[in-house]
Amino acid sequence: MQDSAVERARNAGKRLFHFHGGLRLHHHKQASCQVAVQSVAIPPRLYIPLMQHAGPEATPLVGTGAHVLKGEPVARFNEPSIGYVHAPTSGTIAAIARQAITHPSGLEGLCVVLKPDGLDRWTRLQPMEHWQSADPELIRQRLCESGIVGLGGAVFPTSRKVEEARNFGIHTLILNGAECEPYISCDEMLMREQPDKVVLGALILQKAVAAEQVIIAIEDQMEEVFSALQAAISNADCTHMRLVKVRTIYPEGGEKQLIQVLTGLEIPAGCRPPELGLLCQNVATAAAVAEAVTEGKPLVQRIVTVTGNGVKRPHNLLALIGTPISTLVDACGGYTHDAARLVLGGPLMGYALASDQNPVIKAANCILVLSNRDIQSDQAEMPCIRCGECARVCPALLLPQTLNWQIRNDLLDDASDSGLGECIECGCCDYVCPSHIPLAEWFRFGKSEHQLLAMERSQSNLARDRYLAREARLEQLKQDRERRLGEKKQALRDRTSVTGGTMGQGPA
Amino acid sequence: MSLAIFSIGLLGTVCGLGLGWAAKSLRAETDPIVDRIDRLLPQTQCGKCNFKGCRPYAEAIAAGQAEINQCPPGGEAGIRALADLLGREPLPLNPANGLEKPAAVAVIDELVCIGCTLCIEACPVDAILGATKQMHTVIAAECTGCELCLPPCPVDCIVMEIPEAIDRRRRPRPALAAGAS
């Protein structure tokens, strides 16, 4: 069974499969794909959040007033295998203060505020000249130091993923270029404009995890990307790399869904792809890997799609991390008169932002400005009618209506048993719900509540253990004291009886 | 006839032996209901319930010697959970035991602390570190916020602080539209 699964995983991409559910959606990608990617001018202030992904914030390495060069580390994470936060341009540190960070909670977080000097001077770069013959561990360390994270949206540290992949042993590296969510086109533009960098990054990652083959998966409607990548692959002369077109169905760009399309295998709940010998990386991550290894440049910028009916000239922009979103919108001609809502990410998985002063983060693949007519709901939320449409489209094979009912009634453990953790928050259920119930929103809420509950539980378990340990210790001390007291009394009694016996009388 | 008596008798003996063995070797060491009550209590170990800690309170509830509304840190949600478990009606929190407060941790003003170790002795979860005439400090991750260290302190250098939003992953509860189920 296991062997046949691995065998099928090895044959990934030779035959295409389907995953359950999913939706065919309008693309809305043309708007932002008409013109080449443009760089955004350096703004007067950059706000670099110290919380870049799950886990604690990084610790600042520089103080206010310090001068830093582009690419110099300004903060480091305390955990191993997660590296540094880098200065996106040269300048002076204006402050290290709490600012609104780009996060669904809308809370503030610690940011390094950088005042650029306009020179954009790089720190001394140390490219790895001979990465082909380098130790894979050195490549992994380089990824860690360069702050490379998954740019598909989850921002999981790439070095950690590589480390995990090496432990399991990988035969196939899958580069995910199936950018399935409507409106987003940053990966498509990257693959069109810099196919060589993507292919180079793929080769470096292949070397880092010692994979036998690489598959680059793109959507079947990306014709230009196909020819560009095809040319790049033949230029690089790599025989173990294949380009596969997958059918455009949302959300086939999800890691587990893409693997199912390519191999026909379902990744079991709670498992990760490396357990089947597969590793999935986003194409933009691969390009960042290529820059980090061959040029020595840390991840300080990314391509962001700025699009939607609320913005005048939709564009793909190359922006420094920390650039306020308003700068990006201005570079696209500003808002239209009926712009109504700012969303980070796509229309299905993104979250609304409170302000356009929030900075660009590594996860920011798209800034979607919706207009009034986009967000007008034709109907208010209604009770669930148990139609089951949501279960029919769910790519994770869950029962969204059951989960919805459980989360609303605070039955978080039950929801977790029903597979809440496997929900990829793709929003398909939301989209088809005839009662307009914001299902995905409830699932995100339920996940965060369940996480908090688990945290509280582990804390109370710790308190219980420590309380019981203390009680046991105090009891032991009490017994010891009583025993010692008893022994002393006994000794005293023995002595008095002995002295009384030999001398005939006790001391006066 | 005799076969029937014999077989039923044999069956009874086998079942009896099986039950006898199970009663001995599969016996629960502790009262499972106490464990289940204890799991619902917040483990603050504050003693506001008039018992020495959460486990003694759980034992008292199981024995019917205490009401379920004596735990201020557990609050209304805790009382509801206990009521659900025990099949009782939820009661309002007994104000004699204290009021429900947001979770807090103790913080020692280390400039004022004289190193008397009284708070170390008072802490039910050993979350205070220090020695005689040495500065003391609270291990915030292990502090339950029980407030038991406040009264013994001779220089009143311990304050309760509500930690700022520890978890940024928290999402707002989706707005409930009118008429939704």
Image (tube, coloured by chain):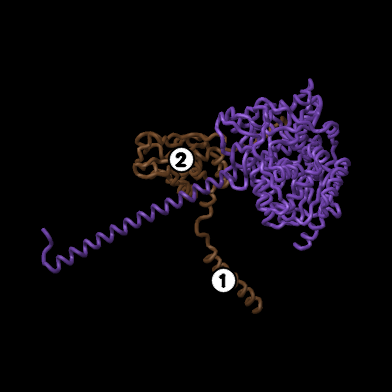
Q: Residue furthest bottom?
A: B2
Q: How many marks?
A: 2
Q: Which mark is residue A139?
A: none
Amino acid type, label 1? Leu
State which quarter of the image contains the C terminus of chain A. Answer: bottom left
Residue at mark 2: chain: B
- Judging by colour alone, the chain drawn in brown in this rendered image is B
Chain letter of mark 1 equals B
N-terminal of the two: label 2 or label 1? 1
In percent of width and height, residue A130 lies at 71, 50
Q: Nearer the viewer, residue B11 or B154?
A: B154
Q: Are marks 2 and 1 on the same chain?
A: yes
- Colour displayed for chain A in the image of the structure: purple
- Helix, strand or loop at label 1? It is helix
* Residue at 71%, 36% in the rendered image: A301
Identify the residue at image location x=43%, y=40%: B137
Q: Is residue B81 left or right of residue B129?
A: right
Residue A48 occupies quadrant: top right
User: Which residue is nearer to you in this view: A79 or A73?
Assistant: A73
10 Å neighbourhood of mark 1: few (<14), some, or many (≥20)? few
A418 and A224: which is toward the camera = A224
Name the spot of residue A375 as percent of width and height, x first.
78, 28
Single out the mark in the foreground, 2 or 1: 2
Which residue lies under the disc numbered 1? B17
Q: Determine if residue A28 is in view.
A: no
- The residue carrying pointer 2 sits among few (fewer than 14), some (14 to 19) or many (20 or more) residues within 10 Å by Cα, namely many
Q: Residue B146, labelled with which disc?
A: 2
- On the rendered image, what quadrant is the N terminus of chain A found in? bottom right
